[in-house]
Amino acid sequence: LIQMLRGAKKRDVLQLLRRAPEAMTPFVVEAAVAAQSVASLAALSDFLDFSKDPKSLLEKFLYAAAFSPRPSGDLLRLVLDKLDGKQLVPEVQETGIVAVGSLVGKLCRQKLCGLQEVEHGVETILSGLRGAENESKAVIYLLALGNAALPKTIPTLLDHAEEGPATVTTAAISALRQFPTQHISDKVKRAMRRIFHETRKSYEKTCRLAAAEILLDNKPLPMDVINILLATSELETETAMFLLLKVQNNLR
């Protein structure tokens, strides 16, 4: 079906989408996303109505886009166009933002970071994070930044990791854990030390554990290992055991 769609004209793809039995429509939408031809994406643009279509169908489209192994700039543009300036149900909006982050990350890994669509996608996420009205919305945008894993967003993630409330801190640290070791710089490690050792303010246990994991998983310094082990004497038994096992696994 995907091969057929890649060679089909827009009107034929659109006719297939419109005539497919209701139970088959999500399957055809996924296939059209996978085809990623100009015609199939144009047909999807005409077919999908984010103000009327059922939430399940829209989420199916967004998941298919997010999990596309080698997405195109055109696919990202389609997702952004469907999200831009529309009043959407929260679940669809959130799934869309996370999908944008995934698409941006994959396009950059294909050396396509300079595409206008990628820049628009990054700005969409960052502006959404700046304007987030509550913690739950901020967490979604931080999750998207983690999916994108762009080095230029690390300062933003560090600010939220150190200064945000517990859920925001946890999400920001989780996003930082998506970055490869070469991007876990001394600046990142210093921030993780401050969080784990609570040198500026108190943090929840999950935040401290996540910070310790970044320190232990990215070419740890001997002093970091020693200080984390020393700190376990003041932690709950389960937390201390988790960190001890983490160190032992690293040694192996």
Image (cartoon, grey):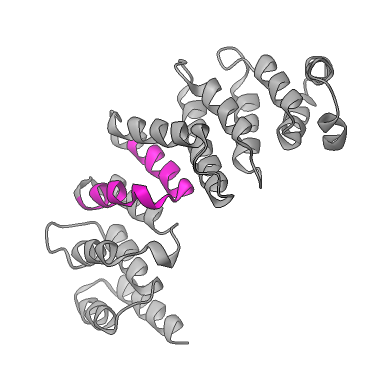
Residue at image location 28% in from the left, 33% down from the top: 130
Left or right position of 205 against 87: left
149 displayed left or right of 59: left
> Depth check: 66 or 133 in front?
66
State how many labels appear. Answer: 0
Q: Tell me which residue sits at (37%, 56%) in the image.
A: 176
Q: Main secondary structure of the magenta part?
A: helix
Query: Which stretch did the figure color magenta?
Result: 138-162
Q: Residue 59, position in %: x, y? A: 60, 30
Q: Is 140 colored magenta in this rendering? A: yes
- Compared across the picture, whether 216 is left or right of 25 comes to left
Indicate whether 184 appears above or below 154: below
Extreme left residue here? 200
Quarter occupied by the N terminus: top right
Left-right relation of 126 to 178: left
Residue 52 placement: quadrant: top right
Q: Which residue is drawn at the image coordinates 61% and 15% (left, top)?
A: 49
Residue 103, picture quadrant: top right
Tell me where residue 172 appears, x and y as whole percent: 33, 50
Q: Residue furthest front?
A: 114
Question: Above or below — where is 47 with respect to 240?
Answer: above
Query: Whole-percent x and y of residue 57?
Result: 65, 25
Residue 12 rendering spot, x and y as whole percentages:
84, 18
Return the residue nearer the eye: 217 or 70.
70
What residue is at 55 percent from the left and 13 percent from the top?
Answer: 51
Q: Residue furthest bottom?
A: 252
Q: Is residue 13 magenta?
A: no
